[in-house]
């Protein structure tokens, strides 16, 4: 997944997924990351730091 936008400058990005109470920190390369290849249901947590403030995104991901 590529996380990029022209209205702000990205200062930092961290992405984690949770599955069955286990946390997995995903490798972030500048503004992109890859979801796990293992099938299953995950909760994703994205923390974004920008020159215009911070944002956090939480969602569900199903890998089939």
Image (cartoon, helix red, strand yellow):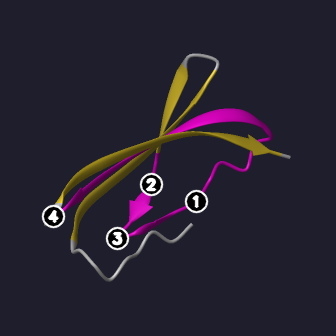
Where's residue 18, x and y in %?
56, 29
| Circle 1 residue | 34
Q: CA distance from mark 2 to mark 4?
A: 24 Å
- 9 on left or right of 58: left
- 2 on left or right of 19: left
Q: Secondary structure at mark 1?
A: loop
The boundaries of the magenta stretch are: 26-50
Marks 4 and 3 in Cβ contact (< 8 Å): no
Task: Say whether disc 4 or disc 3 marks the residue closer to the N-terminus.
Answer: 3
- Closer-to-camera residue (23/1): 1
Q: CA distance from mark 1 to mark 4?
A: 25 Å
- 13 on left or right of 25: left
Marks 2 and 1 in Cβ contact (< 8 Å): yes
Query: What label sits on residue 30 in the rendered view?
Result: 3
Residue projecting furthest to the right: 64
Task: Say whether disc 1 or disc 4 marks the residue closer to the N-terminus.
Answer: 1
Q: CA distance from mark 4 to mark 3?
A: 18 Å
Can you tell which of label 2 and label 4 is closer to the viewer?
Answer: 4
Q: Secondary structure at mark 4?
A: loop
Q: Can residue 41 be found in the magenta stretch?
A: yes
Q: Mark 3 packing: few (<14 Cα in 10 Å), some, or many (20+)?
A: some
Quarter in which the N terminus is drawn: bottom right
Q: Secondary structure at mark 3?
A: loop
Marks 2 and 4 in Cβ contact (< 8 Å): no
Q: Mark 1 packing: few (<14 Cα in 10 Å), some, or many (20+)?
A: few
Residue at 56 percent of width and 16 percent of height:
21
| Circle 2 residue | 27
| Circle 4 residue | 52
Where's residue 10, x and y in %?
25, 69
Against 31, is 15 above or below? above
Against 19, is 55 above or below? below
């Amino acid at each position: 997944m590529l996380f990029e936008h022209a209205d702000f400058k990205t200062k930092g990005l961290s992405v984690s997924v949770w599955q069955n109470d286990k946390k997995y920190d995903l490798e972030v390369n500048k503004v992109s990351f890859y979801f796990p290849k293992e099938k299953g249901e995950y909760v994703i947590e994205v923390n974004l730091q920008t020159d215009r403030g911070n944002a956090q995104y939480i969602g569900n991901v199903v890998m089939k």
